[in-house]
Amino acid sequence: MQRVLIVDDEPAIVTVIRERLEREGLHVQTVGSGEAALHLINQQPIDLVLLDVGLPDIDGFEVLRRLRAHDLDTPVLLLTARGDEIDRVVGLELGADDYVVKPFSVRELVARARALLRRAALRTRPAEPSTPPSPLQIDQPRRHVTFQGHLLELRPREFDLLAFLARHPGQVFSRETLLRQVWGQDGFLDERTVDVHIRRLRAKLAEVDPTAELIQTEWGVGYRFAE
């Protein structure tokens, strides 16, 4: 359950906001002073602070300044009765994420609070496990190929053949198709040309890793690049 802290010394306003946020399924805590807010935030995790600027001890700007000075990135929504643009600008420059001016619509306040909570949840969501990099890296513009960190010395057609197969992992290509796709010819070259180039590619890959089986043979059909 997401935790919201209301920092305001006006009981009537606090009650209205608290009841509405609790109906939204949020865990709500309240304090009436800036010092109490700083103490509570340092003691437990808070997902959003609704911070009144006009507090009885230190004002909301000072509370915000101290939070950001300690690298606390908890989202802060300022509640202020001040309508001057300079006060809103100061709040944002100090690190406020949003603000509403009193008197405000509770519906608008809840909508803004929800938006900040969604943003915060996205920031803290665990990263998806990344796919490990492929041991074979093909730099098409520079026509470089590295395998397990080793640069392979490939002839032009060897590069073209390997790059074509690698673009279609798991797909089987006949020798005739490879001649047409890589050499651009159909019927003018012996199909054994493909076998020779495949053999050379396998030998160069094996110099780096003898167990590598990146280029596989589909007997009676052709060749495929391992998935």
Image (cartoon, rainbow, N blue to C red):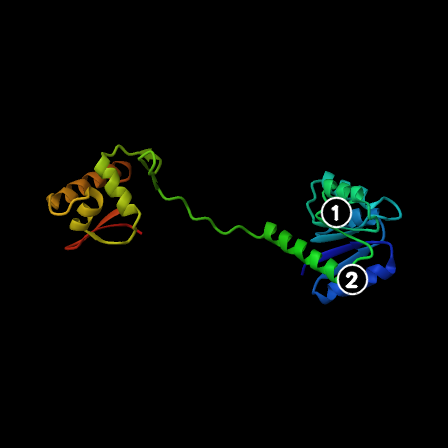
Q: Which residue is at the front of the view, 88 or 14?
A: 88
* Residue 172 at x, y percent in the picture: 23, 54
Q: Amino acid under label 2? A: Arg
Badge 2 crowding class, 10 Å Cα cut-off, few under 14, some 14 to 19, many 20 or more, is: some
Q: Residue at x 28, y 36 (%)?
A: 208
Between 153 and 209, the one lying in front of the other is 153
**Label disc, if present, on residue 96 of the rendered structure:** none
* Residue 54 screen position, x and y as percent: 85, 48
SS for callout 1: helix
User: Considering only vertical position in the picture, is 137 above or below 127?
Assistant: above
Q: Is residue 186 above or below residue 110?
A: above
- Which amino acid is tagged 1? Asn
What secondary structure is marked by label 2? helix
Separation (CA) of disc 1 from disc 2? 21 Å
Q: Is residue 124 left or right of residue 7?
A: left
Total numbered labels placed on residues in the image: 2
Q: Residue furthest bottom?
A: 23
Q: Quadrant of the image for the N terminus? A: bottom right
| Disc 2: which residue | 18
Mark 1 vs 2: CB contact within 8 A: no
- Residue 47 x/y as whole percent: 69, 53
Q: Say if residue 214 shows up in the picture.
A: no
Q: Residues within 10 Å of mark 1 (few under 14, many from 20)?
A: few
* Left or right placement of residue 77 versus residue 222 in this view: right
Image point 26% across, 32% down: which residue? Answer: 153
Instruction: Give residue 138's quadrant in the image.
Output: top left
Q: Which mark is residue 42?
A: 1
